[in-house]
Amino acid sequence: MTPLLEIESVSKSFGGLKALCDFSLRVPAGALYGLIGPNGAGKTTVFNLLTGVYRPDAGRMRLAEKSIAGLRTFEITRAGIARTFQNIRLFPNLSVLDNVKVACHLRARHTLAGAILRTRAHRADERSIAEHAARLLDLLGLCGREDAVARNLCYGDQRRLEIARALATSPRLLLLDEPAAGMNPQEKIALRHLIRKLRDDLGVTILLIEHDMGVVMGLCEKITVLDHGIVIAGGTPAEIQRDPSVIGAYLGTAAESKPGTAV
């Protein structure tokens, strides 16, 4: 089966620092995969390569069998990849609804002339965008908050809004960078249900970076583990939990000899 995302032997260096070395990953359509590793392992470098922030030094990256290596950020978004960030990057002074509508315009059909003249087609397109944004806010549990200023939302709702904005670009692949960061235990449980619902209801493929092992192990079907830019393990959550190299990377090599130690 041809994967939706295929990364083959990708490397990236910054001066003398090898941030990613010969990295490969295949993600099937409709999958929910995780990418984990200690701080500095190269996880965010993978996301930055996939979204055009960085260009790979070597290797290939394909989405639906089409190369995305070297494309600019907006071209990759149009191709079908959207992301969230570890540090929330909303438009803080815009309303909740306008934050999502901004992203919806990537797929808009109206023209500059239509916008200036306020043609019927332009008005219809604007209505469609507003309706689509409202549906996403409802799906993300933000119904009734449309007119709130984004910066006034609680932290968990800001996280949800950022996911809604990413979904507004109609991605085939959604990259979630530390979606549970800063959340309390109840919010993390709700987030797990939400991410699974997005995959099941929207059919979007999801690749996430996450440090919270409870979230990763309870959510992802397959997990890839990075350490110092190198893949050290890959498999199901159960396989990852008992892999000695993973335990060593997180807890130190002494942990490998301790029976029953889990990540």
Image (tube, rainbow, N blue to C red):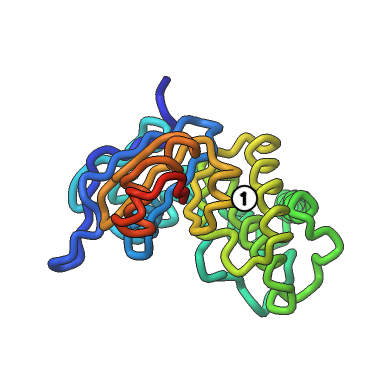
Whole-percent x, y for residue 199 in the image: 63, 39
Q: Residue at x 66, y 49 (%)?
A: 192
Relative height, residue 232 to residue 142 (above, below): above
Residue at the extreme left of the image, as rendered:
16
Element type at mark 1: helix
**Residue nearer the viewer, 66 or 35:** 35
Q: Is residue 116 visible?
A: no
Q: Residue at x 65, y 66 (%)?
A: 183
Q: Which residue is mark 1?
A: 167
- Count of marks, rendered view: 1
Q: Amino acid at mark 1?
A: Leu
**Residue nearer the viewer, 204 or 24:** 24
Whole-percent x, y for residue 210 in the image: 50, 56
Q: Residue at x 53, y 43 (%)?
A: 206
Whole-percent x, y for residue 259 in the image: 41, 45
**5 sits left or right of 194 in the view:** left
**131 sits left or right of 262 in the view:** right
Q: Residue at x 55, y 45 (%)?
A: 217
Question: On the rendered image, what quadrant is the N terminus found in?
Answer: top left
Label 1 Cα crowd, 10 Å radius (few <14 / some 14-19 / many 20+): many
**61 sits left or right of 93 in the view:** left
Q: Is residue 5 visible?
A: yes
Relative height, residue 192 to residue 45 (above, below): above
Quarter where residue 204 is shown: top right
Residue at the extreme right of the image, as rendered:
144
Whole-percent x, y for residue 175 in the image: 50, 50
**11 sits left or right of 50 in the view:** left
Quarter where residue 90 is shown: bottom right
